[in-house]
Amino acid sequence: MEQRIADCARVLADHKLTIAFVESATAGWLCSEFALTDESGQILKGGITCYDASLKESLLGVPHKIIEQFTPESKQVTNELAQRLGKLIPADIYVAVTGLTTPGGSETPEKPVGTMFVSAIIKERLVSKRYVFDGSCEEIIKKAIIAAAELLIQETSSG
């Protein structure tokens, strides 16, 4: 995991890009991984953890209607989080993560535990991905962090 984060941090530093995070299911772990890289001082602006749905509304301003219609763990809400983060933290890239790491959320047969959503705004372009991982809560989070890093490497290098 650390290697993919380090690779991603180098790519961002090479492109002189800064990054900010808004995390739900990963609870700040993604931002923390970037803080441990050699390039952290060049690239990392900060992060917000909004694990509870009420913070998605009160802190980030996601309309209750969107959360109610699509659930707190959804592509639509994750996109909203990424799009709204720029009002709080200035950066070149905004990354949002929501998902289901344990039972008790909005899981359904179509959206089982292990479903994770990563949305990123890179150079003002929104990229969203849905993943379904298996494993323990910790394993799901680690896989989501790696997936986010790989998405950023791919989208930053191709853009």
Image: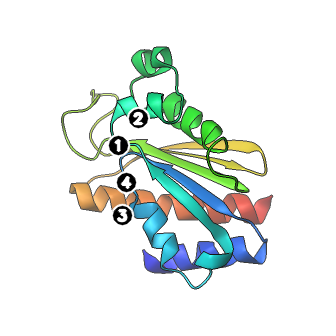
37 lies left or right of 113: right
Dot in front, 4 or 2: 2
In the picture, the quarter occupied by the C terminus is bottom right
The answer for how far apart the CA atoms under marks 2 and 3 are is: 23 Å
The amino acid type of the residue labelled 3 equals Lys
Can you identify the residue that label 2 sits on? Answer: 55
| SS category of the residue bearing label 1 | loop
Q: Which residue is mark 4?
A: 26
Residue 95 vs 19, above or below: the answer is above
User: Cβ–Cβ below 8 Å for labels 4 and 1?
Assistant: no
Looking at the rendered image, the disc whose residue lies closer to the viewer, 4 or 1, is: 1
* As drawn, 77 above or below 2: above
Q: Report which residue position mark 1 lands on.
A: 51
Disc 3 residue crowd, few under 14, some 14–19, many 20+, Cα 10 Å: some
Q: Nearer the viewer, mark 1 or mark 3?
A: 1
**Relative image position of residue 155 (x, y in whole percent):** 70, 57
Which badge, 2 or 3, comes first in the chain's sequence?
A: 2
Looking at the picture, the colour scheme in use is: rainbow
Residue 125 percent coordinates (x, y): 75, 44
State the residue lying farthest toward the bottom. Answer: 38
Question: Which amino acid, by three-letter code, is at mark 1?
Answer: Tyr
Residue 3 appears in view: yes
Going by the numbered disc 4, the residue's amino acid type is: Thr
Whether 64 is drawn above or below 37: the answer is above
Picture quarter with the N terminus: bottom left
